[in-house]
Each structure stands twice: as structure tokens, then as C-alpha cells.
Amino acid sequence: MRQLVYTETRELTGFRKTYDVFRFYFWWYVNYWICRIWFGLDIEGSEHIPTDGRGVLVSNHLSFLDANIISAASPRKVSFMIAKEYYEMTAIRWMCEFLGCIPVNRSGEDIAAVKGAIKKLNKDFLLGAFPEGGISRTGEMEDPKQGIAMIALRTESPVVPVLLSGYRYQTMLATFLLPKKIRIKIGPPLDFSGENSKDRESLERVTNRIAQSIQELREL
């Protein structure tokens, strides 16, 4: 288990900051041990997640549990780009706000979400994103969208590929009542410093490389 690193996802002072630090450590350990004991979580490659500075964790998307699994493998808060309908659910809204998540409107291009992600990365946050744009019902990775590539390039952020495996889409209730052994594998950061966020071909190359790097983790 890596040493945890508290990072602010909103400006706090005094008691409110002390409380946020305490809540982070408490929430992280509770989430970690639930994932380890109830879901048999196996973690590989967590040393590739940066302990400071900006970065984008890009992962395939298998279930409602994915953000919790990735958080259990990260030594610091991960601010996920999450579908607006989930962000607004009362049961998890507190966690979304606590982690500094960004609600995304999946009905079309969400400029506000893109700007929010760029703003957080420019403050050296750790962003979590699912380039497929939704949960895969088959377990196979679907065609990725270019938005994550554009965000990473505009902020000059390293991209860390993440592969989730061992389980697949179920209802939220079935996910918890019928647990499957889960594995998360994290690869080394990808450097796209030679690419241009304003060039369509460049965005396509980066998008394809991100998807390929996630798939390649299956063979390691």
C-alpha cells in the first residue's frame, strides 16, 4: 500500500481543511478495504500514478464501481469526469463534491465540463476519465471519444492508462450483492508533448494511442 498524499480539491482553511484531511483518510481506507475484502481487489502498477502535479487517469468503463476501484489504487484524490445523472444522485453527491468531480452532460458536447477539467488540471489536480463516454455493456472497450485527448494536450498532462477487469456491467444492486473478483492494472504515463490539440489528425492519433495502451495492459 502506497503512502497517501492529501491534495486539496477546493480552497479550505482552518477547521474545514482539517476536517477535509480527516475525511479523506477515513474515506480512503474504508473504500480501500471494502474493495479489497468484498471485491477481492488486486492492484498492479499503482506506482505509476503521480503523487504530485497534474495527470489524467484514463480507463475502460465496466460498472458503477469503477471510480471507487480507481480511487482505491490512487494515493491521492482523483477528480472524475462523471455523468451528470450520477453526479446528481443524492446517495453519491457528497462523494462527488468531496473528490471534486466534474458533471458531464452526455447528450452532446459539454463545453462547461471540458473547461472545468482543464481548470482542475491547471491547478495540478489528478483527473479520472473514461474515454468511452459510458459503461460498456459487453465488457469490450468501445470506440473512444477525442475529448480526453484534447483536454490532456491542452494542459500538457501525462496520461496514465488503466485497465479494469474481472467483472462486467450489472445493475447497481447486483454489483454489491453479487461481487466479482476485480483487478486493476495501471501502466506507465504516456507523453504526448509532440502532439497538437488543435490538429484533428493529432487528436485522432492520441485518442487511438490511449485506447491501445489500455488494451495492451491485458497482455502484460
Image: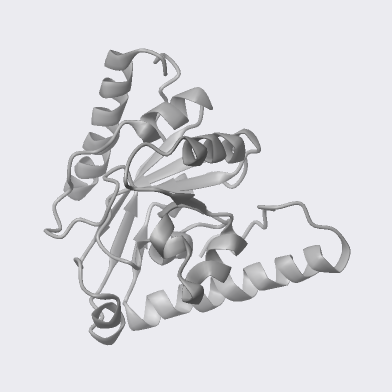
Residue 208 seen in this snapshot: yes
146 on left or right of 113 = left
Q: How many labels does the image show?
A: 0
Name the one closer to the observer, 25 or 91.
Answer: 91
On the image, the x and y values in percent for residue 144 come to: 24, 38
On the image, the x and y values in percent for residue 23 come to: 67, 72
On the image, the x and y values in percent for residue 79 come to: 53, 52
Q: Residue furthest front?
A: 107
- Eyeballing the image, is 205 above or below 18? above
* Residue sitting at x 54%, y 46%: 126
* Residue sitting at x 50%, y 31%: 157
219 on left or right of 31 = left
On the image, the x and y values in percent for residue 63 come to: 28, 65
- Eyeballing the image, is 126 above or below 155? below
Residue 176: quadrant of the picture: bottom left
Name the one closer to the observer, 220 or 153.
Answer: 153
- Eyeballing the image, is 3 above or below 175? above
- Eyeballing the image, is 220 above or below 180? above
8 on left or right of 201 = right
Residue 49 seen in this snapshot: no
Name the one closer to the observer, 24 or 188.
Answer: 24
Q: Which residue lies furthest to the right in this view?
A: 14
* Residue sitting at x 41%, y 64%: 86
Name the one closer to the observer, 166 or 10.
Answer: 10
